[in-house]
Structures are given as C-alpha cells and as structure tokens.
Amino acid sequence: MGVEKQIRIILVDDHTVVRDGIKLLLSQHQELKVIGEAANGEEALELYNQTTPDLVVMDIRMPVMNGLEATRQLVMHDPSAKVLILSMHNDDDYILHAVRNGASGYILKDANKDELIRAIRSVADGKKFYSGDISGILIKELTSPNIAQMPVAEEENSIEALAAELTKREKEILKHVAEGKSSKDIAVELNKSARTIETHRFNIMKKMKVNSTVELLRKLKGKTF
C-alpha cells in the first residue's frame, strides 16, 4: 500500500481554541499537515504567499479582513488556490458569496469530524465539497426562475457577445465546464496540467463577467457554443 500524498494546510480562524481543535483532529491523519495559522484574512494572504499550501481552511467572520474577501483576493491572485470555508453561518447570502468569490467548498462548524476530513481531502484533490444543506441552497440558486424571467433577447445577446471574446481553447474548455467536468478531468482529456486549466477557467470567468462556476453555469444554462 503506497504512502498517501501529504496535504499541506493553512488554518484561518480568529479563535485560537478553534484552530487548536482542528489541529488536534488533523494530527490523527498522517497525510494532513498544518503548516501555518492565521487569525484574519490579511494574515492569511501573507501566509499563503510565504508557504503556498495545498489548501486553506477559512472562517468567515474575522477582524481586519473577513474570510469572504480573503478568499476573493486569494483566488484572484492564484486561480489554482483551494479554499474550504468552515463556518457557523448557513444562510444563503454567506454561502453564495463564498462560492462566487471562488471557494471550492463550504462546510458548517457543527459537521462531524469525518465529514470535515472528507471535505479537506476532496477540495485538496481539486473537487468541490458542500455540506448537505449547503448543496440544497446552491441547487436552489442554480434552478432559480429569476434567470428565466430576464428578457430573452437581452440575455442571449449578452452571453453571445461575451462568448465571442473567448479564444478557441477557452471555448473548448467552456464546453467541458458546462458538462460539469472538474479541472482535473478536463486536464486529463486535453493533456494539459490542472494548473493550466484553472488559469483558463479564471480567464473565462473574467471574460464572461462572473465570479464563480455556479454563476457561470447559470449563465450557460440552455446555451451551446
């Protein structure tokens, strides 16, 4: 049996006791290594640049800079950054804001320890992970009738105009994203690195004027390119 790949983690929470509790839990798993801690978003950004971890476990409500803004800046600086939000907040605004800002996962602080470990491993592996209740909120947002109530011509013209700015490679990747494929899956299919695909996805979202994959999928619903 091979040795599991080590996952290097930064913990970001303004409560020392919370960070200590998470560290104690993670210490029971040899492949999970906490390489740094931060008490606010600003410290997290500095620490990320110094250590380039595999995963950031981020709280939301913190002094100086909150976790939502820190996530946005992290992903803007490094599109391949993986952020797992660990928060007590389960209301729609926090969840959707986190996803739009680039978080790869969202789990509640009252989750059991096994779910937290699964979330960490999944996000570190390039997958998305959301607690059951969180998934329901995201699905509700994706299937919201609001998008369908927009004037059809205005919506289609907007999407077509934005898509026209994409390169041939970006359009190819966009088709895979619309099919629900992860960056890792797309990388294998196109024989590219996952980091290259993440960079393309970041550029696509920028050109399509969206802040997250969820928002992008809503915009692409029913469209082909």
Image (cartoon, helix red, strand yellow):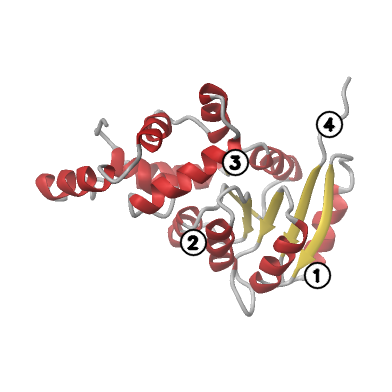
Query: Which quarter shows the N terminus?
Result: top right
Q: Earlier in the sequence, mark 1 or mark 3?
A: 1
Indicate which label's residue lies in the foreground, 3 or 4.
3
In this rendering, the label closer to the viewer, 4 or 1:
4
**Vertical comparison of 110 with 123: above or below:** below
The x and y percentages for residue 203 are: 43, 49
Q: Nearer the viewer, mark 1 or mark 3?
A: 3
Amino acid beneath label 2: Tyr
The span from disc 2 to disc 1 (Cα, nearest Å) is 23 Å
Q: Residue at x 40, y 34 (%)?
A: 169
Circle 1: residue type: Thr
| SS state under label 2 | helix
Q: Position of residue 148 (x, y in %)?
A: 19, 44
Residue 28 located left or right of residue 126: right
Lower position in the chain sequence, tag 2 or tag 1: 1
Residue at image mark 4:
4
Q: CA distance from mark 4 to mark 1?
A: 29 Å
Which residue occupies 80% across, 55% down?
22
Tell me the crowding category of disc 2: few under 14, some 14 to 19, or many 20 or more residues within 10 angstroms, Cα based: some
Q: Amino acid at mark 3?
A: Arg
Q: Which residue is mark 1?
A: 16
Q: Tell me if label 1 and label 3 are in contact, CB under 8 Å.
A: no
Q: Is residue 47 above or below residue 117?
A: below
Q: Work out how far the residue at label 2 is from the one at label 4, CA to CA, in angstroms.
A: 33 Å
Could you tell which of marks 3 and 4 lies nearer the N-terminus?
A: 4
Label 3 element class: helix
Which residue is identified by label 3?
A: 195
Q: Which residue is mark 2?
A: 94
Q: Nearer the viewer, mark 2 or mark 4?
A: 4
